[in-house]
Image (spheres, grey):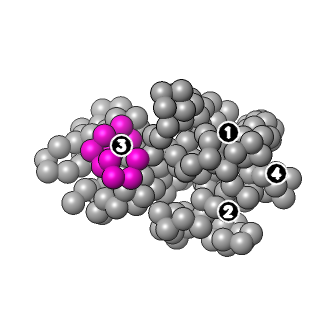
């Protein structure tokens, strides 16, 4: 049994949860606030981020370390598929969302709407929010283009690229910041991801004091 230290506002935590659900890994969750990590978790992961993956006395921390471990040790349901070129594309897209999207969109919107509120009770900075929303439009156009070309983002099969993108987007969707009707290919792609059994528990997530958007749990949105 795996213990995953996580928080529902952490896209890297959601990514690990979806991966484990796809691979049928049994796990339990322990929630930690990423803006106020306990000293115990800081000792387990000096980088002070989530998730932290604990099993049989072993500790794995760090987004890429956790996902690579899962892929290497639970091979019955692979999420890196295809030849070396396609696997490179999957990794490129994972990096796109975990780095570029995270910096250009997540940190602006979620940082202002959620982290600032719970960390110090501060009000969102309207300029930061506007920058995040503008950046989100660029990323949604790119997702829409990718989804128009193939059934999934990295090709015709569901891969870790889809898991990573959906983990990030689902938080923006919870907050009601994604204008899905303007990106019909992206919307169709996301509806397929939302309908997967591995996504069921993600759609049950709640953020204390913040209600989900109207269509967050709706599979036919």
Separation of marks 1 and 4 at Cα, in angstroms: 17 Å
Residue at image coords 82%, 51%: 183
Q: Nearer the viewer's eye, disc 2 or disc 1?
A: 2
Query: What residue sits 27% from the left and 56% below the top?
Result: 3
Residue 130 x/y as whole percent: 80, 40
Q: Distance between the residues labelled 4 and 2?
A: 12 Å
Name the front one of labels 4 and 3. 3
Circle number at residue 183: 4
The residue pinned by badge 1 equals: 105
User: How many other residues sit within 10 Å of disc 4, few (<14), some (14-19) or many (≥20)?
Assistant: some
Disc 2 designates what residue?
A: 191
Mark positioned earlier in the residue sequence (3 or 2): 3
Asked where in the image residue 96 lies, by quadrant, the reply is top right
Q: In screen coordinates, is 74 left or right of 196?
A: left
How far apart marks 4 and 3 lie (CA) works out to 31 Å
Magenta segment boundaries in residue numbering? 66-78
Query: Element under label 4?
Result: loop
Residue at mark 3: 71
Separation of disc 2 and disc 1 at Cα? 21 Å
Viewport quadrant of the N terminus: bottom left
Residue 85 in the image: x percent, y percent? 53, 27
């Amino acid at each position: 049994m795996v213990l995953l230290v996580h928080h529902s506002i952490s896209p890297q935590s959601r990514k690990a949860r979806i991966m484990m659900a796809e691979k049928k890994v049994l796990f339990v969750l322990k929630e930690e606030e990423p803006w106020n990590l306990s000293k115990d978790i800081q000792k387990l992961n000096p980088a002070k981020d989530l998730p932290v993956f604990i099993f049989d006395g072993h500790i794995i921390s760090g987004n890429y370390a956790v996902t690579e471990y899962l892929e290497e040790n639970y091979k019955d349901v692979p999420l890196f598929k295809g030849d070396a070129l396609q696997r490179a594309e999957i990794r490129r897209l994972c990096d796109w969302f975990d780095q570029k999207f995270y910096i250009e969109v997540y940190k602006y919107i979620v940082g202002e709407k959620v982290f600032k509120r719970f960390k110090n009770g501060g009000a969102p900075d309207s300029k930061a929010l506007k920058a995040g929303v503008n950046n989100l439009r660029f990323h949604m156009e790119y997702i829409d283009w990718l989804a128009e070309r193939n059934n999934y983002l990295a090709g015709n099969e569901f891969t870790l690229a889809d898991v990573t993108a959906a983990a990030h987007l689902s938080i923006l969707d919870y907050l009601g910041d994604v204008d899905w009707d303007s990106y019909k290919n992206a919307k169709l792609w996301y509806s397929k991801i939302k309908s997967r059994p591995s996504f069921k528990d993600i759609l049950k997530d709640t953020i204390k004091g913040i209600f989900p958007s109207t269509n967050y749990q709706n599979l036919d949105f």
